[in-house]
Amino acid sequence: MVPIIDAPSPNHGPRRDPAVIDMIIIHYTGMASGPAALDLLRDPQSQVSSHYLIEEDGRIFALVPEDRRAWHAGVAFWAGHRDVNSRSIGIELVNGGHDFGCPAFDPRQMAALDQLCLDLIARYQIQARYILGHSDIAIGRKIDPGEWFDWRARAQAGIGLWPEIVPSAHGNRAAVDPASFRAGLAAFGYDPQEPEVITAFQRHFRPQGLTGIPDQECAAILAALLSSIS
């Protein structure tokens, strides 16, 4: 396990139910540098923090104790839950994000993320369906960790879901009924009332085509996801 560096942040409060930790939310910092992000996450005036921050070189900083409610998710929703902060572990990845040219995530950073997530999954028995990006739970507000974040590689490491669909569905952009597709998204956990919910789904599970329009390929991916949790 990569050594964890203590860097306490004051930006946290009590969990609603300390016994319930069943989600991991992954973010990017969207800032020019790691030190700037660390300063922000520890600044009491910012009123924002995560439990962990992972630098590009793989160093892990522990900001908020896991039994405390870090302020990272904001207004959010997943699978009927709106106080996502109270039931999740938040992990910030040092990455400039969309505002800084969508830089690639460093392999050392991804290795540290995988080690941390696998440890959290084992200790809290977190289901793959509840390992998400900020963009999945804060639709219309957040787009991190971005469409270039490699969710497939994470799933191959045992972190989260990545569906394998039938070859005939790949690249099939024929339209499907939006209402029924949204109903499927709701069954998986997304908030179907959000106008940008389809784009949020695509950003995670079909990042090569952020059309905002459900198609046969998206339908096959969603069907595979729903089958995996049934």
Image (spheres, helix red, strand yellow):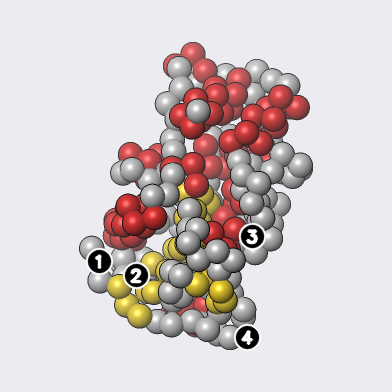
Instruction: Give the label, 1 or 3, closer to the camera.
Output: 3
- Structural crowding at the residue carrying mark 3, measured as other residues with C-alpha within 10 Å and reported as few (<14), some (14–19) or many (≥20): some
Q: Disc 1 and disc 3: Cα gap in Å?
A: 30 Å
The CA distance from mark 2 to mark 4 is 23 Å
The answer to whether 166 is drawn above or below residue 222 in the figure is above
Lower position in the chain sequence, tag 2 or tag 4:
4
Q: Rounded to the nearest whole Å, what is the CA distance between mark 1 and mark 2?
A: 7 Å
Left or right of residue 214, residue 60 in this image: left
Q: Evaluate if marks 3 and 2 touch, with contact meaning CB atoms under 8 Å apart.
A: no
* Location of mark 3 (residue): 83
Q: Disc 4 residue type?
A: Gln
Q: Distance of mark 3 from mark 2, alpha carbons?
A: 25 Å
Depth check: give the residue in front, 174 or 204. 204
Q: Real-space Cα distance between discs 4 and 1? A: 30 Å
Name the residue that disc number 2 marks: 60
Residue in the image at 25% along x and 66% along y: 2
Sequence-first tag of 1 and 3: 1
**Residue under label 4:** 45
Place of residue 162 in the rendered image (x, y in percent of width and height, measured from the top left): 43, 35
The residue carrying pointer 2 sits among few (fewer than 14), some (14 to 19) or many (20 or more) residues within 10 Å by Cα, namely many
- Residue 62, position as x, y percentages in the image: 39, 74
Foreground mark, 3 or 2? 3
Q: Is residue 3 left or right of residue 208?
A: left
Quadrant (top left/top right/bottom left/bottom right) for the N terminus: bottom left
Amino acid type at circle 3 is Asp
Give the residue at x 62% y 80%. 46
Q: For the residues labelled 1 and 2, say whether their Cβ atoms are less than 8 Å apart.
A: yes
Q: Secondary structure at mark 4?
A: loop
The extreme left residue here reads 1
Disc 4 crowd rating (10 Å Cα; few below 14, some 14-19, many 20+) is: few
